[in-house]
Image (cartoon, rainbow, N blue to C red):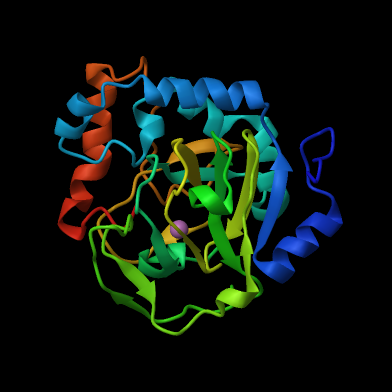
Amino acid sequence: MSAPTLPDGALAPEQVAAYERDGFLFPLRVFTAAEAARWAAEIAALPTPELRRHPAPWVQKAYLLLPSLDALTRDPRLTGPVASILGEDLLVLSADLFIKPPASRKRITWHQDVNYWGLEPLRILTAWVAFTEATPENGCMRYAAGAHRERLRHIEHKTADNMLSKGQEIAVEIDEARAVAVALAPGEVAFHHGLAPHASGPNLTDRTRIGFAIRYAATQVRQTSGPAITARLARGTDRFGHFALEEGPDAPLSPAALAAHRRALDPHAAYSYSTV
Ligand code: NI
């Protein structure tokens, strides 16, 4: 069952309360299945061998490469519900594609998104947009309810099947029996708090699973450590100026877009791109 958003895009008070209690909120019917199918088709048609030669990981900050994804991150149907939680002035700090090919072992260990990011205050939310169906069988996310109130210690254990850049993993055991499967239909969205622990398993199906995880921050958030993160203003006004603001791409994979993408990501290469 989808929890429909209100006509003006704002969340109902009980939806905000559920987010604050659990650390997540889903499913939200934000986009149509047809829109999701168009994004999935655009991703599938990309010249991925060429993109793999691009020096920065193209799946990170992908909105700097593709105007359609830039428009998605700034769409009022999405930023409206985000504003209900973070306020009207919103930045995108990153937005990463998570592509799990058919029958792939790729998985994501339990982690908190902001654990490695020197960002304060933690007015940060991830909006995970399903471009294809996300199910337990194809490796949808799992959330641990109510565990978003503190930073948990992480260890780094990089393995080939872990999609996280440093193999970061929460050091304490998460109770899998209490984990919530984040099943989404194409075009639906899940929100989670920057400290909400989440993980995902392998894709056991014969179809590619694609999700787009957008990290929204209130403009008051500032960076306290690490190489400088640049940001895209997604809604409202930036009265703080804590981040250098990015421009959107002029055309898909244009020379200017590829150059802007490198400018944003190159400072993070020495950190395995783990801060964006
Ligand atoms: Ni994550």
Q: Whereabouts is ligand 1, in terms of quadrant?
A: bottom left
**Which residue is at a point 50% across and 47% down the rendered structure image?**
138
Residue at the image position 44 percent from the left and 38 percent from the top? 206
Q: Is residue 19 left or right of residue 121?
A: right
152 or 268, nearer to the observer: 152
Residue 49: image location, x then y, percent: 19, 27
In this rendering, position of residue 113 left or right of residue 31: left
Question: Is residue 124 visible to the viewer in this orientation of the structure?
Answer: no
Q: In this view, does 232 lie to the left or right of 256?
A: right
Quadrant of the rendered image containing residue 100: top left
Q: What is the tally of numbered marks visible in this picture?
A: 0
Q: Is residue 70 above or below residue 96?
A: above
Please tell me which residue is depicted at 26% across the width and 21% down the height of the picture.
Answer: 47
Question: Whole-percent x and y of residue 259?
Answer: 21, 27
Q: Is residue 74 visible?
A: yes
Residue located 73% across and 49% down the image: 84
Residue 18 picture location, percent across and down = 77, 63
Percent coordinates x, y for residue 5 in the rendering: 80, 40
